[in-house]
Image: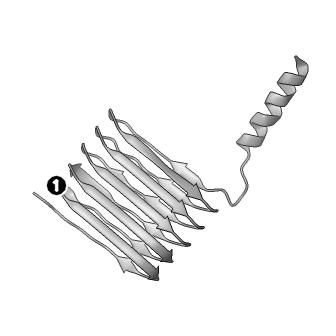
Amino acid sequence: MFHKILVASVVAVSFASAPAMASGIHIHQFGWGNHAGGAQIGFANQIGVFQNGILNSAVSHQFGNGNVAAIGQDGFNNVAGTIQNGNGNAAGVGQFGSNHTAVLTQDGNNNVVAGVQVGNGCDAGVTQAGAGNVAAFVQTCP
């Protein structure tokens, strides 16, 4: 019995301590029926989600190092996705109202894309390929 407790304690401590170059995922979902998912392969990647309303979906995929993705949302029935292949990319979204869709794709290094959408029923798709690209979009769909 003592050996099982000792092994369990060692396993718990090894999962609790992470290297300094660890990646991070921060998810807050307050409403009902929200979904969040994603994947990280690499070092020092960060994903934050939020959501708040109901029936929102968020997915972020990061392949590389030093990428940052933040999604947001707030209303209901919003869908957001970020895909980052490379190093040092930054993506955001926003949204706030309802029935929005945003997909941000970055394939390269040191690219920046932002967002926001507000009202109802906006669709946005931004794709960046190469290095050093900067994009921003703002929409106030009715």
Residue 113 in the figure: left or right of residue 17: left
Query: Could you say where residue 140 lies in the image, as x and y percent from the top left?
Result: 16, 62
Q: Which amino acid does label 1 sit on?
A: Gly
Residue 116 in the figure: left or right of residue 21: left
Task: Count numbered badges in the picture.
Answer: 1
Classify 47 as above or below 106.
above
- Residue drawn at x 51%, y 48% as measured from the top left: 26
Query: Could you say where residue 22 lies in the image, as x and y percent from the top left?
Result: 66, 56
> Can you tell which quarter of the image residue 16 is in?
top right
- Residue drawn at x 24%, y 45% as measured from the top left: 75
Q: Mark 1 points at which residue?
A: 119
Is label 1 in a helix, a strand or a loop?
strand
Q: Which image quadrant: the N terminus?
A: top right
Residue 43 in the figure: left or right of residue 8: left
Query: Could you say where residue 46 lies in the image, as x and y percent from the top left?
Result: 54, 58
Classify 81 as above or below 32.
below
- Residue drawn at x 58%, y 53% as measured from the top left: 24
Classify 10 as above or below 61.
above
- Residue drawn at x 50%, y 63% as measured from the top left: 68
Among all residues in the image, which is located at the extreme right? 3
Near mark 1 (Cα within 10 A), the count class, few <14, some 14-19 or many ≥20, is some
Q: Nearer the viewer, residue 70 or 101?
A: 101
Query: Could you say where residue 63 lies in the image, as x and y percent from the top left?
Result: 55, 63
> Can you tell which quarter of the image residue 125 is in?
bottom left
Q: Which image quadrant: the C terminus?
A: bottom left
